[in-house]
Image (cartoon, rainbow, N blue to C red):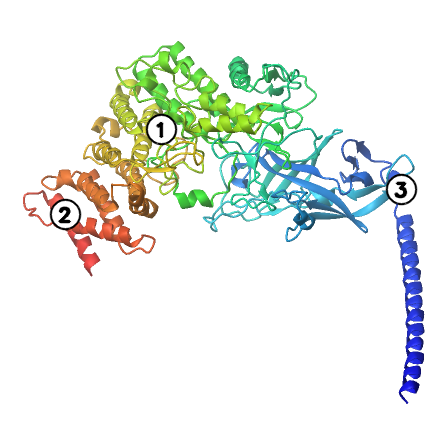
Amino acid sequence: MASCQSIWGKIMMNRNRRGLDIGLLLLTSALSTFSVAQAQDDKKKDEGTPTIEKKVKDLTATEGLFDFYTDPKTGDVFMEISEDQLDQEFIAFSYTENGVLEAGHFKGAYRDQRVMSVNRHYGKLEFVEQSTAYYFDETNAISKAADANISPSIVAAADIIAITEGTDDATDRFLISANGLFLNEKLHKVSPTAGPFSGPFSFSVGGLSSEKTKFADIRAYPENVDVIVDYVFDNGSPTNYGSDAVTDARSVTVKMQHSFLAMPDEGFTPRLDDYRIGYFLDQVTDLTSADPAPYRDLIHRWRLEKKDPDAALSDPVKPITYWIENTTPVEYRDTIRDAVLTWNQAFEKAGFTNAIEVKVQPDDADWDAGDIRYNVLRWTSSPQPPFGGYGPSFTNPRTGEILGADIMLEYVFITNRMTYADVFDTAMIPASSDELEALPQDDHLCSVTHDLQVGNLFAQATAEAMGASDEEMEELVRQGLYYLLLHEVGHTLGLNHNMKASILYGPKEVHDKTLTQGVPVGSVMDYPAVNVAPVGMTQGDYYMLRPGPYDDWAIEFGYRPDLDDEARAALLAKSSERGYAFGNDADDMRAPGRGIDPRVMINDMSSDPVAYGIDRIKLANTIIDGLLDKYGDEDSWQKLVRGYLVASGQQATMAQIMSRQIGGIYVERIAPGQTDAAPFTPVPAETQKDAMKALGTYVFSPNAFAVSEELAARLQNQRRGFGFGGGTEDPKLHGRVLNIQMGVIDHLLNPRVLQRMTDSAVYGGDYSASEMLLDLNTVIYGADLGGEPNTFRRGLQTAYLERLIYSVDSPVYDPVARAAILGAIEDLRHRLAGIDFHLSAEARAHRKQLKRMLKWLDA
């Protein structure tokens, strides 16, 4: 029986196998038939698709990296891509050729750069942005999964509308509509993104108009192509009409250039970043490294190669060439050329002679500044200049190689036109840390000229007050322009800011020309104060006139060809030496609660900013006292107003700088074992107390910002039509002074500062938050407890107590800080408990108001 069952089982198994084989054969045959049919359908479809030659027969061709064809009747544009360009990486770059600030654009603004490829998916071509943020070592097996959980972005897709099949000598070519690729926001978001502070009455460009948006120009070359588009936005019912620069808020045009570049030839060696030197960089994380900081960040630098690799000094094979645009005022061209060429001194440290050359664009040149093949120093005079200088560059994100750069210069820098602070309720106090962090970030945006122009105006006012000659005034302008060019060219060489470089010399040494020799600051990449000498002291260098020691060091690090590991380590070990201090925008303390090292600050000067600040405030007081004598007989009061705004703005700036010593931590960019020092050292208590004493005398004292009655009565802005718009034009001096004072208190009472004072006690800090607030009570109230507080002091004392009461129970403060604030409040309660019958009625009412506020707290 068992034997019969076994035989039967074998028979059935064979039948099943034969059935399975037949099924597989039928399935294979069906799939083959389907594939053939599909191929035939695709062929018929391709045969039904017109050839490119037929499609573009009557169109205007622009040949280059990608060929474009323009319909002369309709303006429609088509783009041709060959098969050998598919799946190949190229660089996409966008920038603003023209726009208005209200729309989030200004002339020459670099927008973005990306690595992209074009892929074919059946009847479409896809434009795909590739990730450049990660590195995989090809020798590591995990690199086989390099695309895991990293998603490319398909930013646009276009239908193939014509095909030309290749021959033995050519590849297939595909034609797509460029309208659907460029006349929208697929490649780049042109319209501004609403910010966190936007409201219903904020300026809005409206929606993109498909009828008005159009191609402005197409320039194609063998290695790149530029597509310029006029993006027109319509807003039928604007609630905010913007500035006069917006001709009509119902229609706003932004001219954008989109550039595609072939991936540069191989042969460029990337150079890895180090935190001790400040280069712009492309951030890359090594996902095959076990290092706790697996960074392979690539610094931005030009491809610079020696003609003679064996020579200590050699000209480059191809120098970095800048063109002075023919829009540049003729009288400044020599100064601009000389300033740019001064950078050659730094490149000699890296082994190059004549690394940089400067040429002037001919008036009959057949190219314009938008051509990315040329690095252009461009000049404009805008109604609302967003900067005085701006030096961006764009790179190959795969290597960090700089491929092009422009420098934008605004004519406002050398004029006397005020660009801000021309109303009295503005105290030139920077935005809060939270507001700054909420703004769009662009590493290349540079406001150095904004600060330089105000400093320049103060220097001019000082020079005029001291009876400077016309030649001396011209020298001041020349030095300012020289420094501006040095700074902005530095950006285009790859360097970011160095806000710590101003500590090179002491507050007296910095005015000695024989010592500084054109280098009063360690780096041209700083935002230092314009170095105006105090009364009675010989004027030194106003500005940097050549790259400083830090700049020489940084250029050697970035451009020295033979920088092997040993030479690199030896070079970086200099970071702790004098002249090589570095701290960039991420570290500076320009806003309350931002940064921790008071030496990394903008608009400061010298290794003792408190002493320097006192000298500057005294000088500002002298200028203010002499304004009427200097400008009292002008045709209008505008010079008088400008002089007061600029001088009092310097007082505000120095107050901010001095306050940063309090709660500060010195930070050293050093590697383990480089020195015996630690990265963090609290500012000595004596230095912090000196800063508090200076604030008490020059910021919080009863007469800190006193002006004469005669001057105050004449501070009238120039009238212009209905410019006041129903507002009031009287000089609001109390509001201005209180803004300056509360700007300092914003720092001293910032939660981060108070917590830092507590945290730093663990590693050497010996000035507590509680002690600091008691000292602050003394400088704000102490001088008036036995006498009459003036109206400025009354406003300060009330606002300060309001801030304490508001803060004492705020959850943003740590428990130790809240206790310190409560202690300060109780100290004031004790100070105000005295008898006040001897005071005037106004002073008694003020004292009663303060006591009432304390009772509200108890309730």
Look at discs 2 and 3 and give the one toward the viewer.
3
Seen from the viewer's position, the closer of residues 784 and 520 is 520
The amino acid beneath tag 2 is: Arg
**Residue bearing mark 1:** 604
| Horizontal side, residue 280 vs residue 654: left or right | right
State the separation of the CA atoms marked 2 and 3.
91 Å
**Residue bearing mark 2:** 847
Q: From this view, report whether residue 847 is shown above or below residue 25.
A: above
State the separation of the CA atoms marked 1 and 3.
66 Å
Asked whether residue 784 appears in the rendered view, the answer is yes
Q: Is the residue under label 3 in contact with that under label 2 (CB below 8 Å)?
A: no
The first of marks 1 and 3 along the sequence is 3
**Residue bearing mark 3:** 165
The first of marks 2 and 3 along the sequence is 3
Determine whether the residue tagged by mark 2 lies in a helix, strand or loop: helix
The amino acid beneath tag 1 is: Asp
State the separation of the CA atoms marked 2 and 1.
38 Å
Asked whether residue 849 appears in the rendered view, the answer is no
At a point 17% along the width and 51% down the height, the residue shown is: 826
Q: From this view, report whether residue 329 is shown above or below residue 182.
A: above
Report x, y in % for residue 300: 58, 31
Seen from the viewer's position, the closer of residues 264 and 719 is 264
Q: Is the residue under label 1 in contact with that under label 2 (CB below 8 Å)?
A: no
Judge the density around disc 3: few (<14), some (14-19), many (≥20) Cα neighbours within 10 Å.
some
Judge the density around disc 2: few (<14), some (14-19), many (≥20) Cα neighbours within 10 Å.
many
Report x, y in % for residue 405: 60, 28
Look at discs 2 and 1 and give the one toward the viewer.
1
Q: From this view, report whether residue 817 is shown above or below residue 672.
A: below
**On the image, which quarter does residue 423 sit in?**
top left
Query: From this viewpoint, which residue is outermost toward the bottom?
Result: 1
| Horizontal side, residue 287 vs residue 791: left or right | right
Determine whether the residue tagged by mark 1 lies in a helix, strand or loop: loop
